[in-house]
Structures are given as structure tokens and as C-alpha cells.
Amino acid sequence: MYTPLPAREGGPVTRNPLAAPLRGTLRVFNAALAVVSLSLLASTLYMYIVYHRTGLLPPAPTPSETFKHLKLMEPAPPPASIDDGNTLWFLWLVGSFGAIFLAVASSGMVGLQPENRQRLFMHIILLTGLILTEVAVLIVLFTDDPWREKIPEDLTGFWPLVENFIDKNTRVVKLAALAAIGAQLAGLGASCWLHSMYQSAYEDWIDGVEAEETRVQQELGRAAEQAYAGSGPSSWQSRIRGKYGLNSKEWEATALAAAAVQQEGLVDEGRRRSGLPEIGTP
């Protein structure tokens, strides 16, 4: 006997008891990343405003200095408005890190729901790239290689301040950097763990849907087989019996006989058109 389908769930459901604590932890982690990203973007805006308003650019040459350089056939220094493209490297670096942090935090927040497991996977990829980039920057900062001589001048004036702070508080900066890297590694591990839960729940849901569809097909097949085999009373058999006085088997036999007579008539018509005698004619 066919039974109706149970109410199908709208999607995969994670029943692991650790899923809720992981979501809460990752929500706090991504909120912290968002705060860091907004701080970096605000710092970038502040440096940009200071760069254009407080005169950190080198002063433009005076008329007497310009005349002196022209008289001596020496090139005059460039005016303050000319930028070789490298003077704002620290500003663009801070802004880029702020944008990356914001992208990581946004993808992490959106990917906390089970139906957004693909966005959570993108969050894992972005966070992994961010951690590797930070490790590379820390290696450059805390090595004794003469890397500082290769860095172009920062006319905003903020990189020398940061460099001086790192030199005076090297131990504190190292500990803070290691703590930040450790927190991000913990967030990465939690994200990977939650994504594995979501993926397992999705696969279980797909298996359940396929099993349900298989059961429905089997039930429908048995119901159709019982109806067309005439093994029990049905509504269409009752209608045939009441209208024509025939049961289902007699109705099927009558229909087959009518089809055979129609086929013989078509054959006879074709033989007459071809000039051949009809079937049964001597």
C-alpha cells in the first residue's frame, strides 16, 4: 500500500553538538578581524589626509634656486606635486591589508550558515593566504638582512615612525605578532572543522533524498502494477463495469479484438487500391 511522503527538510541540518560553539567562536573571531580591517582602512584614510594637508612633501624650489640651477645647467629638483609612484607605498600597503582583512571577515561571517559552506571554503582559502603573507612580512621585519636599505622613501612620514617603534619594542612586537598569528591559525582550524561538519551533513542529506526518491519510485511502480494487473477493485474498473457491463479483462479483450478488426480493414483497403483480391477471397 502506497504511503505519502514525509515532510522533506529544506536542506542539510548539522546535528553535531559542537557546531553551535564553533559558530559562536568564529563569529567572535570574524568580528575581531572586521574591527582590525576597519582600523587599518581608517588609518589609511588618516594618512592620506595628513599627506595632502600637513606638507610632508619636500618643498618646491624657490625662484632663486631654480635660477641657480638653470644658470649652472643643473637639473632643478622636481616640484612637490610630482610623485614617482613609490612615495605612498606604506599607505597603499596598509590599505591593502585592511581590504584583505575585511574580505576575510565578510566571507567568514556569511559562511557560518550550513547552506553557505562554499563561502566558508572561500574564507578558509583567503585566511590561509593572509596568514602566509603575514608570516612572510614578519620574516622580513625580524631578520638582520639589509632589507631596509632597499625600501623606497615614504614621504608620508609614517613608516619611519613605525620603524622606530619596532626598533624600540622589538620583543613586544614579536610577541604580539606571534599571538596574532596563533589566533588566526586557531580560527583557521575551527573554520576547517566546521566546514567538514557542513560537508558531512550535506552528503547525508543528499543520500537521504536519493533514498526517498528510490522508495517513491518503488511504491509508485507497485501501485501501477496492481492497478493494471486487475488484481483488486479500482475506480476505473468500477466505471467500466457500470457503463459497459464488462469487467476489466473483458474490456481489454474487446479492445484487442477491435484493434485487430481495424488492422484487417486497413490491410484490405490497401490490397484493393493495389488491385489485389481481399484476404479470404478466392
Image: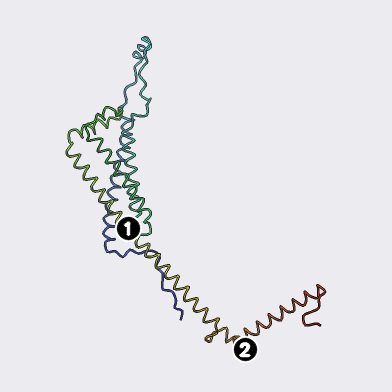
Viewer-nearest residue: 28 or 177: 177
In the image, what residue occupies the spot 63% across and 85% down? 251
Q: Which of the labelled discs sits on residue 258, or is there none?
A: none
Q: Quadrant of residue 280?
A: bottom right
Point out residue 20 in the picture as x, y percentages from the top left corner.
Answer: 28, 61
Taking the view exactly as shown, the residue that stands out farthest to the right is: 275
Q: Earlier in the sequence, mark 1 or mark 2?
A: 1
- Looking at the image, residue 110 lies above or below residue 51: below
Q: Secondary structure at mark 2?
A: loop
Taking the view exactly as shown, the residue that stands out farthest to the front is: 282
Q: Which of the labelled discs sits on residue 196, or is there none?
A: 1
Point out residue 73 in the picture as x, y percentages from the top left corner.
Answer: 38, 11
As shown in the figure, which amino acid type bears the numbered disc 1? Ser
Viewer-nearest residue: 116 or 267: 267
- Looking at the image, residue 136 lies above or below residue 220: above
As shown in the figure, which amino acid type bears the numbered disc 2? Leu
Q: Mark 1 near mark 2, Cβ–Cβ under 8 Å?
A: no
Mark 2, Cα crowd under 10 Å, few <14 / some 14-19 / many 20+, is some
Q: Which of the labelled discs sits on residue 246, or is there none?
A: 2
